[in-house]
Image: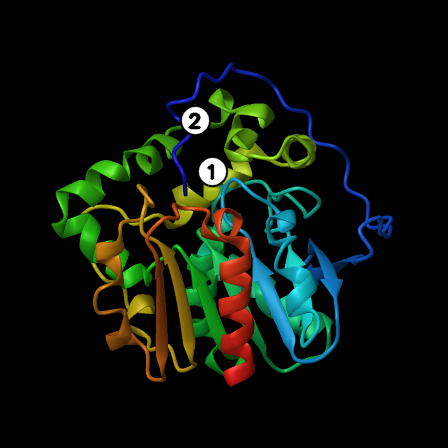
């Protein structure tokens, strides 16, 4: 959930490209397709065969975020990397309520059903991590395991927002994103500013031009914790599957203090890997390390 409010962003009007459900060319060698989630089409890229592994990106991102992890993980799993609703080639329903966590977790369930499976291991970064945690709490029988990147358990984040002044201060960007005029201050190029590689940045700009800025920010409007930062009944549900957490300790937006006590809310084993030299996009900054850790964890299970 990185802050973009410090960037100099011009106000622009983005015309969303019309949605097409036709198969996309697989120039990358991976197959593209769509799953239906109660009338909302969720775009995905898939590779490999084996147990189902669903990968969920965060903000501002899209399925391409996982390009370094997919080849290795697809050697042992059927990897499906999705575009969340509002992003890139997935549908972009209008209205804050369309981005409530119940809708986001239902999208993951729809992908599992689309492939005629009963469960999946779910990998999530940032908002994708929030969706992954929430999915495991809401759909325990459909969750074989969780891999979470730089998104502590939402219960821990809520606690830190209430009790840790630094976390509260560093979450100011999220409050800015919830303002009515926030989407008008974003541009595709500005959103892609975090991407280091020039060729990848061009791909991101095109993906964000296809996206809905309002939809992106509706994740914050619908779900980001608000004062008085109470723990909801939903967050009190236990996670019943094994969990791997990988966290870049230089993340200025999601501080490591929120990792404390995460194990109390998980009924199975929890593995925590901290990366002192990585920031928020840990899987992009340290792709080999993250890929290796995920692959080993999956193998050990």
Mark 2 Cα shell of 10 Å, populated few (<14), some (14-19), many (≥20) = some
Spatial CA distance of label 2 from label 1 is: 8 Å
Q: Is residue 164 left or right of residue 217?
A: left
Mark 1 Cα shell of 10 Å, populated few (<14), some (14-19), many (≥20) = many
Residue corresponding to mark 2: 182
Residue 233 quadrant: bottom left
Q: Earlier in the sequence, mark 2 or mark 1?
A: 2
Identify the secondary structure beneath mark 2.
Answer: loop
Which residue is at 33% across, 75% downward?
237
Residue 12 quadrant: top right
Residue corresponding to mark 1: 217
In the displayed structure, 90 sits above or below 115; it is: above
Q: Can the viewer see residue 229 in this picture?
A: no
Q: In this view, does 119 lie to the left or right of 80?
A: left
Residue closest to the eye, 67 or 233: 67
Which residue is at 50% across, 49% downward?
58
In the displayed structure, 43 sits above or below 116; it is: above
Residue closest to the eye, 165 or 215: 165
Give percent across and percent down for residue 287: 54, 54
Give percent across and percent down for residue 125: 47, 55
Q: Is label 2 in contact with label 1 (beta carbons under 8 Å)?
A: yes
Give percent across and percent down for residue 280: 40, 46
Residue 268 quadrant: bottom left
Q: In this view, does 20 lie to the left or right of 222?
A: right
Identify the secondary structure beneath mark 1.
Answer: helix
Q: Can the viewer see residue 39 in this picture?
A: yes
Which residue is at 66% across, 42% downward?
88
Which residue is at 61% across, 59% downward?
69
- Label placed on residue 231: none
Quadrant in which the N terminus appears = top left
Give percent across and percent down for residue 93: 61, 44
């Amino acid at each position: 959930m990185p802050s973009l409010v410090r960037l100099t962003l011009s106000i622009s009007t983005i015309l969303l490209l019309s949605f097409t459900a036709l198969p996309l060319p697989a120039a990358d060698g991976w197959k593209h397709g769509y799953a239906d989630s109660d009338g909302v089409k969720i775009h995905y890229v898939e590779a490999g065969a084996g147990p189902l592994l669903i990968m969920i990106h965060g903000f501002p991102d899209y399925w391409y975020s996982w390009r370094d992890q997919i080849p290795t993980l697809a050697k042992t799993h059927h990897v499906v990397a999705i575009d969340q609703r509002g992003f890139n080639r997935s549908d972009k329903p209008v209205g804050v309520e369309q981005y409530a966590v119940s809708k986001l977790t239902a999208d993951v369930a729809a992908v599992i059903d689309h492939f005629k499976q009963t469960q999946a291991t779910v990998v999530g970064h940032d908002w994708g991590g929030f969706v992954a945690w929430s999915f495991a709490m809401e759909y325990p029988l459909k969750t074989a395991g969780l891999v979470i990147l730089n998104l502590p358990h939402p219960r821990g984040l809520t606690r830190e927002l209430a009790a840790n002044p630094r976390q509260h201060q560093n979450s100011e960007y999220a409050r800015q994103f919830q303002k009515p005029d926030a989407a008008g201050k974003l541009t595709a190029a500005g959103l892609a500013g975090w991407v280091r590689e020039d060729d990848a940045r061009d791909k991101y700009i095109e993906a964000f031009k296809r996206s809905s800025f309002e939809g992106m920010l509706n994740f914050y409007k619908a779900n980001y914790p608000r004062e008085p930062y109470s723990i909801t009944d939903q967050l009190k549900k236990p996670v019943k599957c094994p969990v791997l957490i990988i966290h870049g300790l230089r993340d200025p937006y999601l501080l490591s203090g929120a990792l404390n006590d995460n194990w109390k809310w998980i009924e199975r084993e929890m593995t925590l890997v901290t990366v002192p030299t990585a920031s928020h996009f840990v899987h992009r900054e340290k792709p080999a390390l993250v890929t290796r850790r995920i692959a080993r964890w999956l193998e050990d299970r």
